[in-house]
Image (cartoon, rainbow, N blue to C red):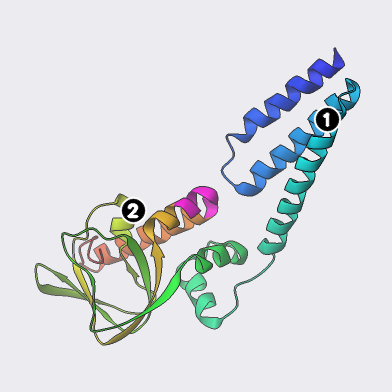
Amino acid sequence: MTATIVLNLTYLVLVSSTFTRTAIWLRLFVCVGSVGFITFGVMTDVPSMVIWNALIGSMHIVAVARILRRRRETTAGPQADWIRRVVFADLEPALFNLLWTASWAAEYDDHTLTVQGTAHDRLAIVLSGVVDVRIDGVLINRLGPGAMIGEMSMMSGSVATADTRAAGPVVLREWNRAELLALGDAEAAIGRSVEQAALRSIIYKTQVGVSPAAAG
């Protein structure tokens, strides 16, 4: 009877794990489930269940330790720290590090970044330089360091509603939209932070008289 209760509680833990949204909690649930199966294996004299779940549990414990160690790390570099403070202030340094390392630096010089009416699959933040924004050929804004490009397309999956072009040398930090959304699904805090930053950008552009989609 006791073994049956342990087994059912273990299954309940594993079912509950499907509702988690972060990797660390999923692994912790698996660890607890492994302990339950080990207990059941000992009580019912099933050595293979004990051995396999000891191995599985140990692997997930190691993975949890790595995640916790990574979360204690901070992002190196003044440029990255500046972006975190200005754009992603609500995101803890270790999670920002995951976000930052999923992106890449890109340099442009008098280069078209987005084209009005065409699909755009990247989110970008201006690190240096100036980006001109045009709708129907009319210059409506100039974006400087810290500004987002492509946040509307990232949020909605729609085509770019403005042309953006590097006005001379420009350095951007870019994310692939699909990879960024996948990262947000894996780490809910990152997804929320990116979404909030995008909304703030859209609201700011609206308040200063610029179309919400002005940057893509």
* 145 vs 201: above or below: below
| Image quarter of the N terminus | top right
Disc ID at residue 48: 1
Residue at image coords 84%, 18%: 3
Please tell me the numbered disc located at residue 155.
2
Q: Residue at x 71, y 38 (%)?
A: 30
Comparing labels 2 and 1, the label whose residue is closer to the camera: 1
Farthest residue toward the top? 1
Q: Main secondary structure of the magenta part?
A: helix
Does dot 1 land on a helix, a strand or a loop? helix
| Vertical side of 6 occupied by 22: above or below | below
Can you name the residue that lies furthest to the bottom here? 168
Residue 185 among magenta residues = yes
Percent of width and height locating residue 216: 25, 63
Taking the magenta stretch, the answer to whether it contains residue 184 is yes
Q: Which residues are magenta?
A: 182-189
Tell me which corner region of the image, top left, top right, bottom left or bottom right, holds residue 109. Answer: bottom left
Q: Is residue 107 left or right of residue 186?
A: left
Q: Is residue 56 above or below residue 13?
A: below
The amino acid beneath tag 1 is Ser
Element at label 2: helix
Residue plotted at (75% across, 23% down): 9
Q: Seen in the image, is 32 located left or right of residue 171?
A: right
